[in-house]
Image: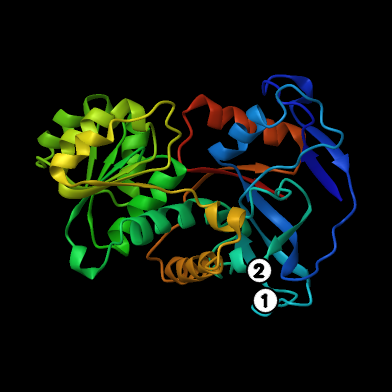
């Protein structure tokens, strides 16, 4: 099978930042399924892994990354119970295993969902990582329930992959009032299309939230830069509110600032369950299946915004360039 990988952590402009190569199709065993991939999408974790995992070494074999895919199930391991050959599936995968930038991939059934029937492979491939991330933050880390309907949430980075679907889920499933952040005309419009009740400029966050009519908010979901916005978050969060982040803090934040308000802070990393093989790994399959029903009911919509044709080095590079620019809106997908 064909796969795209890298042997060194190089700048994306370098010729060998990605290489195409042939390798054997893996065989499914245990709880693994073998997927023939139809489409993949890219996320910031992709370029972060590429930049860091082979900085001062040359790997013997190319490392294959990528953690969003949709395809058809080709074979199953002897312990698989929830899926069968021929099923259409979508999933994010496991950070510790070979990624989806290839024609076939092995993945544990417990982190795989049945593809929404109403979505194309491309539209479905855009959604697993961001949907699981947003769902876990909102309903597991924050613990949002029916009693919270009508409460306010500030989504910082509203036009990105996670911010886009978080806005939809918070509004459509959680019943929250959503304030998303954006600064360009095109990102403001995108956030509105995701269902944001208010869109504020993150460049003057406190004043913008106040101008929207909110002195403070119940929840803050940071998808951008915890360090940069920390002081604003401390001011904007309500007493007993909750702050959650998926960004990579480069330095410690001053948690003592939250004590007077009894505010809690939550990290979300959707690879925790697969990385540590937690007892509740299968919850990610459940999340994807619940989300599939919501997509099919048109309560949620895919955040696909850019499609490239063909599994090749140049398309992978182009997708990484766009993400690294910080200008990406929604999700970029590569169709096979």
Q: What is the number of the mark on residue 24?
A: none
**Contact (Cβ within 8 Å) of mark 2 with mark 1:** yes
Is disc 2 placed on a helix, strand or loop?
Answer: helix
* Spot occupied by residue 127 in the image (x, y as percentages of width and height): 52, 54
Q: Residue at x 89, y 47 (%)?
A: 23
**From the viewer's perspective, is 165 left or right of 271?**
left
Which residue carries the number 2 mark? 109
* Location of residue 186 with respect to 331 vertically, above or below: above
Dot 1 crowding, Cα within 10 Å, few <14, some 14–19, many 20+: some
Q: Nearer the viewer, residue 217 or 177?
A: 217
* Spot occupied by residue 175 in the image (x, y as percentages of width and height): 24, 62
Q: Residue at x 73, y 31 (%)?
A: 314
Q: Earlier in the sequence, mark 2 or mark 1?
A: 1
Q: Residue at x 23, y 69 (%)?
A: 146
Q: Nearer the viewer, mark 2 or mark 1?
A: 2
Which residue carries the number 1 mark? 83
Is disc 1 placed on a helix, strand or loop?
Answer: loop
Q: What separation in Å lies between label 2 and label 1 (alpha carbons)?
A: 7 Å
**Which image quadrant for residue 183?**
top left
Q: Would residue 302 be seen by someone viewing this image from the given angle? A: no
Dot 2 crowding, Cα within 10 Å, few <14, some 14–19, many 20+: many
* Spot occupied by residue 85 in the image (x, y as percentages of width and height): 75, 75
* Spot occupied by residue 233 in the image (x, y as percentages of width and height): 23, 35
* Location of residue 77 with respect to 191 vertically, above or below: below
Q: Nearer the viewer, residue 330 or 249?
A: 249
């Amino acid at each position: 099978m064909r796969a795209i990988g890298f042997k060194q952590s190089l700048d994306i402009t370098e010729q060998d930042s990605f290489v195409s190569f042939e390798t054997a199709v893996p065989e499914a065993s245990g709880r693994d399924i073998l997927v023939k991939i139809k489409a993949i999408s890219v996320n910031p974790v992709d370029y972060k892994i590429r930049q860091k995992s082979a900085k001062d070494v040359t790997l013997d074999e190319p490392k294959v990354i990528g953690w969003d895919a949709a395809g058809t199930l080709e074979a199953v391991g002897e312990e698989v119970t929830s899926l069968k050959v021929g099923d259409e599936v979508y999933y994010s995968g496991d950070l510790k295993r070979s990624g989806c930038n290839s024609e076939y991939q092995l993945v544990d059934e417990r982190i795989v969902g049945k593809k929404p029937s109403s979505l194309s492979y491309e539209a479905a491939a855009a959604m697993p990582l961001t949907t699981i991330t947003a769902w876990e933050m909102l309903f597991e880390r924050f613990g949002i329930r029916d009693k919270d309907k009508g409460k306010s949430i500030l989504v910082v980075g509203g036009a990105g992959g996670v911010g886009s679907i978080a806005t939809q889920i918070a509004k459509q499933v959680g019943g929250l009032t959503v304030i998303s952040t954006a600064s360009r005309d095109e990102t403001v419009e995108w956030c509105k299309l995701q269902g944001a009740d208010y869109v504020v400029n993150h460049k003057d966050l406190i004043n913008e939230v106040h101008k929207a009519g909110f002195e403070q908010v119940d929840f803050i979901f940071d998808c951008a830069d915890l360090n940069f916005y920390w002081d604003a978050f401390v001011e904007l969060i309500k007493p007993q509110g909750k702050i959650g982040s998926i960004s990579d803090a480069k330095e410690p934040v001053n948690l003592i600032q939250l004590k007077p308000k009894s505010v809690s802070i939550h990290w979300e990393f959707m690879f925790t369950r697969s990385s540590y093989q937690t007892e509740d790994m299968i919850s990610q399959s459940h999340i994807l299946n619940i989300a599939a029903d919501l997509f099919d009911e048109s309560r949620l919509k895919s955040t696909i915004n850019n499609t490239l044709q063909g599994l090749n080095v140049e398309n992978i590079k182009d997708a990484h360039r766009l993400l690294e620019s910080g200008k990406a809106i929604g999700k970029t997908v590569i169709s096979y």
